Amino acid sequence: MQITEIYKSIQGESTYAGMPCVFVRLTGCNLRCSWCDSEYTFSGGHRMAIEEVLGEVERLSPDGGVVEITGGEPMLQERELLPLMQRLLDAGHSVLLETSGERPLEKVSKGVVKIVDVKCPSSGEGDTFNLENLEALESRDEVKFVLSNRSDYEFARDFTLRHDLARKVNAVLFSPAFSKAAKGLRDASHCLLDPRELAEWMLADNVPARLNLQIHKFIWDPAMKGV
Ligand code: SF4
């Protein structure tokens, strides 16, 4: 597998936010989101065998715990990723898979929690979610929308309601996008959409979703990698 980095930190998003987590970040992505903060994953990395990845995860988190598979787009390495995730489940880990949902997800083990980041129009990749993946969503999964403005919010709200997401999955997450140039101050001034404004819209519309802030951006310098 082509791996950019493996490290332990605090999970910053989803309903697992705040928990210790080992991140396995795979190299390569087929999308180019305008606000992407992971462009360093687009190339480079180093080859690791499944056994080597497992060994590094066990070294960082010997007693089980949460592991997130992220990228880049991890499903581009599906052939090796699917057995890796099964091995992690078998070893007693909770496994999260962060994916855009552009690639088919039906072969992902039901034990894996899929966190599907449906791209909104302002990302520049708005039509990339594969609607057939709605059938692959399970009650433990989560669907995330990263929002830059009112148009993104309306897209996310309408998508959530049209596909009845709140009844299909464990959580629907509305997350303000962070400026990829953000550094220094650890506050909401770097959000492309003011969280307070988003909260007011969600309350006004009674959207069945939860406001999701990337808490790692508030703990460490937003420009820091590997946290
Ligand atoms: S899918 Fe993720 S890694 Fe790929 S460009 Fe978008 S935000 Fe960046």
Image (cartoon, helix red, strand yellow):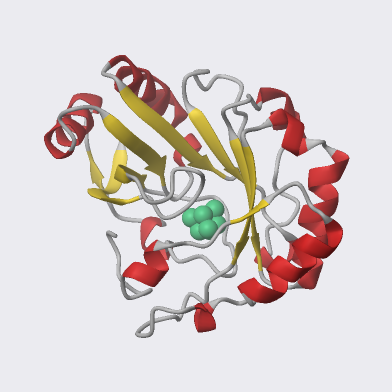
- Residue at position x 39%, y 78% in the image: 186
Quadrant position of the C terminus in the picture:
bottom left
Q: How many discs mark residues in the rendered view?
A: 0
> Residue sitting at 38 percent across and 84 percent down?
185
Question: Does the rendering let one see residue 52?
Answer: yes
Occupied quadrant, residue 133: top right
Residue at 82% of width from left, 54% of height from top?
206
Q: Position of residue 66 (x, y in %)?
A: 33, 35
For residue 71, side relative to residue 62 (left or right): right
Whether 38 is drawn above or below 70: the answer is below
Q: Position of residue 148 (x, y in %)?
A: 67, 71
Q: Position of residue 132 (x, y in %)?
A: 75, 29
In the rendered structure, the answer to whether residue 206 lies left or right of residue 80 reads right
Q: Residue 104: x and y, percent?
A: 62, 29
In this view of the protein, which residue sits in the foreground, 4 or 70? 70
Q: In percent of the image, x 75 and y 70: which residue is there?
A: 200
Q: Identify the residue at the far left of this view.
A: 59
> In the rendered image of this protein, does residue 157 appear above or below residue 121?
above
- Quarter of the image where one finds residue 53: top left
Task: Kindly tell me whether residue 193 is visible in this rendering.
Answer: no
Say if 97 sits above or below 183 in the image: above
Where, quadrant-wise, is the N terminus in this rendering?
Answer: top left
**In front of the other: 83 or 28:** 83
